[in-house]
Amino acid sequence: MIDLTSDFGKRAARRLSEDEIIWLTTTDNQGTPQPRPVWFLWSGETILIFSRPQAHKVSHIKLHPRVALNLDSANSGEDIVVLLGTALIDPSPISPAEMEAYIEKYRQGLVSIKMTESEFKDSYRTTIRVTPTNLRGH
């Protein structure tokens, strides 16, 4: 479990709750880092990400479950938040409360990409859960 009690930890927790994009970096089968921006939901313990089943990040995680997550910095390079952790392709059903929180967070995003909630659930049906093991930044 990462420490979210320090001033930095509290700021990181706030950003994890409020930011809309996090950069997920996986490693492909040749060992090359593959960063990509993703939508996410922070539970206070894990990060929930949905994916299309055929996406490269899914196969990368199955091969190499260690990942990095980064929140965008401020324009001046301040407010850096980096998480290291272990990702899991989670076969468990998602709780209705968790799904509703995710959909509520990205309701406007779904409108902007012209996707209904039902289309999103049908397309992005692979659940990825990341358990952070290290938090760093400033």
Image: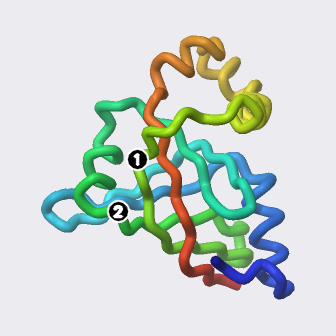
Q: Amino acid at mark 1?
A: Ile
Q: Amino acid at mark 2?
A: Pro
**Which quarter of the picture shows residue 11?**
bottom right
**Which quarter of the picture shows residue 34?**
bottom left
Quick one: label 2, few (<14), some, or many (20+) residues within 10 Å?
Answer: some
- Residue, x 23% and y 65% (percent of image)? 32
Report x, y in % for residue 136: 62, 83
Vertical comparison of 128 with 132: above or below: above
Left or right: 15 with respect to 30? right
- Out of 121 and 112, give the one closest to the viewer: 121
SS at mark 2 in the image = loop
The residues bearing labels 1 and 2 have C-alpha atoms spaced at a distance of 9 Å
- Residue, x 79% and y 83% (percent of image)? 8
Q: Which residue is mark 2?
A: 65
- Out of 114 and 105, give the one closest to the viewer: 105
Report x, y in % for residue 129: 52, 52
- Residue, x 47% and y 27% (percent of image)? 125
Q: Which residue is mark 1?
A: 89
Marks 1,2: beta carbons within 8 A: no
SS at mark 1 in the image = strand
Q: Which circle's residue, 1 or 2, is located before the other in the chain?
A: 2
Residue farthest toward the front in the current orientation of the protein = 92
